[in-house]
Image (cartoon, rainbow, N blue to C red):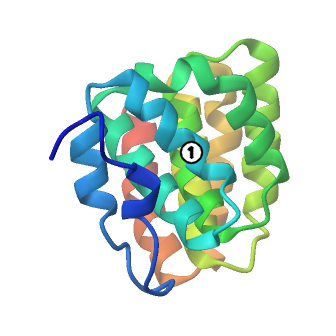
Amino acid sequence: MSRTRVNILELLRGGDRRSIGRAGEVAAFVSGNSRRFRELIEGLWNEDLLVRMRAADAAEKVTRRHPGHLQPHRNRLLRLMCQTKQQELRWHLAVMIPRLPLTAKERKVTTSCLITYLADRSSIVRTCALQGLADLARDDPGSRAAVIKIVCEALRKGTPAMKARSRKLLSQLQRQ
């Protein structure tokens, strides 16, 4: 596959919401290439909801190894995180945004947004919000106690997925 001729957003079209399509292939394709990553990020605003969700999935995969790729897009991504209602965008943004070095104000906005995600009807969004809050707390000891309280609440009242994630997060947060 030639890196300059492939329309990465076209690779993400088709199918239905139950499939990630070629998101993994696209993630591998753009990994380590910030220019192509920029094209992938543009997919988060695509008119096609499948492209948006798969672009978010691919971007999240890429930023596990290359979190710095998010930096040029941080302001737009923070706004999108607080504005989007699409569950697939929410769950990926919830874990991507905490990978950024955030100012105190951005951290506050992100935390507030993630707390609203805890009321989302999607268990996946709520579970990813817990992960995002815990990731933020790792770099902010001042917020750790409040996040531990939220995680403990999810451990008692959450869905099975939330309880499982909460057990892992609680263990990690208490070791720090």
Residue that badge 1 annotates: 132
Residue under the point 73% across and 46% down? 81
Position of residue 49 measured from the top left corner of the image (x, y, whole percent)? 64, 70
- Quarter of the view holding residue 23: bottom left
Q: Tell me if residue 19 comes above or below residue 63 in the rendering.
A: below
Q: Amino acid at mark 1?
A: Gly
Compare residues 142 and 120 and report the one nearer the observer: 120
The residue at the far front in this view is: 5
In terms of image quadrants, where is residue 108?
Answer: top right
How far across and how far down the image is residue 152, in percent?
60, 59
What residue lies at 65% left-to-right and 36% top-to-bottom? 145
In this rendering, does residue 176 appear at all?
no
Q: Residues within 10 Å of mark 1 (few under 14, many from 20)?
A: many
Image point (79%, 65%), residue name: 85
Q: With 97 as the anchor, is 57 left or right in this view?
A: left
Q: Residue at x 75, y 71 (%)?
A: 120
Is residue 17 placed above or below 2 in the rendered structure? Answer: below
Which residue appears farthest toward the top when viewing the image?
103
Residue 17 spot, x, y in % from top left:
51, 83
| Left or right position of 66 against 73 | left
Residue in front for this viewpoint, 104 or 9:
9
**Residue that lies at the very extreme toward the left in this rendered image:** 1
Q: Is residue 54 visible?
A: yes
- Judge left or right: residue 122 versus residue 19: right
Q: In what quadrant of the picture does the C terminus appear?
A: top left
- In terms of secondary structure, where does tag 1 sit? helix
Give the vertical position of 107 relative to 152 (above or below).
above
Q: How many marks?
A: 1
